[in-house]
Image (spheres, rainbow, N blue to C red):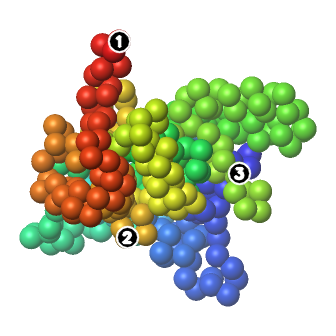
Amino acid sequence: MGNALRFLYEQCCKPTTAGDSELLGHHGVSSAKVGVSALAQDLFHFEITSQVPEGLGKHVVSSKKAQANWYRKLIEAWREAKPPPKTPEEAATLIIGTLKRHHKADVKGLLTFYGLPLPHTLAKLKVGAPASLPVGVKYEFETLPVDAKAVADGDTMTVYVSTIDPQESSCIPSEVQMAAVQRSEARAEKNYAKADALHKRIVDSGYRVLNFQNNEEILARKYRIRLKGIDAPESAMPYGKEAKEELTKIVQGKSLRVLVYGEDRYGRCVGDLHCNGKFVQELMLKKGFAWHYTAYDQRSELAKWEKEARAKRVGLWASSNPEKPWEWRKDKRGGR
């Protein structure tokens, strides 16, 4: 197995040390790691090897042929889920719904194997359960640390999400999986020309292999982000450079929580960004490096933060009549 995929495997399924052996779950990992990540990794490996996990037969009554059929169905269901499961409750619900026509004993055994909630406990958890995400949010994810070069301007950036994330791990295209394995093998053989060509294939598919400390490699998915509800000056406008520098200062080297509401016409995820518990749009508005984009977001708190910055005459509000970025873009499109 290549370094990139080995890293994915070890993060979710790496055995604990001998001193922790009493805490091992069914997959040879601590109970804290058995669950969504283990299921995602088993689906990931099944798609490559067509092999169901060892030990599953002790918990279910059906044959390995039937078990393989479950995993094929679960892979398809996981890919179709919007968003894919991220919590034990969501993963359990997906299994129960996908395998509802199969033996109840098998469904229960599969849930037990992964340490996921059983049907009767899941029903209890759902009663009165609050919504986990704000209204309008379709899904969320956590990014890898943001590179300063990935910030395009004061309201747009590129981020990467590790495919270790359960939401990503079973959605990796098979051609990307194989290219990652082949790239690692090529690098091990010092065939760097082949490795670079394979990495170009990975990049063209919307992924990238990133290097971190200790030369660890992570296969990550690329997302372009447009901050919801604000519009910062374009790079060529007054305060455009300052807006970009401010956003860079906020996010550089940090992992972000992104709440995605949808996509714009350019294919960018439109979302709220949170960095170290702080709302990034709030910071940009209060510093006076963005306008409240009222045409697309009517949240009153955004208007309030812009008003505070105007009153203090900070950032672009130091100018007596700053040009609105949407009007600037309109003029450029009109050739003025």
> First in sequence: mark 1 or mark 2?
2
- Mark number, residue 277: 2
Residue at the image point whose x is 46% and y is 55% from the top: 246
Measured as percent of width and height from the top left, residue 121 is found at 21, 72
Spatial CA span between label 1 and label 2: 42 Å
Q: Is residue 2 left or right of residue 292?
A: right
Q: Which residue is mark 1?
A: 335
Measured as percent of width and height from the top left, residue 273 is found at 36, 55
Q: Residue furthest left?
A: 128
* Camera-nearest residue between 187 and 23: 187
How packed is label 1: few (under 14 Cα within 10 Å), some, or many (20 or more)?
Answer: few
Q: Of circles 1 and 2, which is in front?
A: 1
* Camera-nearest residue between 100 and 92: 92
Q: Identify residue type, mark 2.
A: Gly
Measured as percent of width and height from the top left, residue 40 is found at 47, 52
Residue at the image point whose x is 35% and y is 12% from the top: 335
> First in sequence: mark 3 or mark 1?
3
Residue at the image point whose x is 62% and y is 32% from the top: 202
- Mark number, residue 292: none
* Camera-nearest residue between 35 and 164: 164
Indicate the quadrant where residue 155 lies. top left
- Report the label total: 3
Q: Is residue 189 left or right of residue 244?
A: right
Q: Which residue is mark 3?
A: 211
Q: Is residue 336 left or right of residue 120?
A: right
Q: Of circles 3 and 2, which is in front?
A: 2
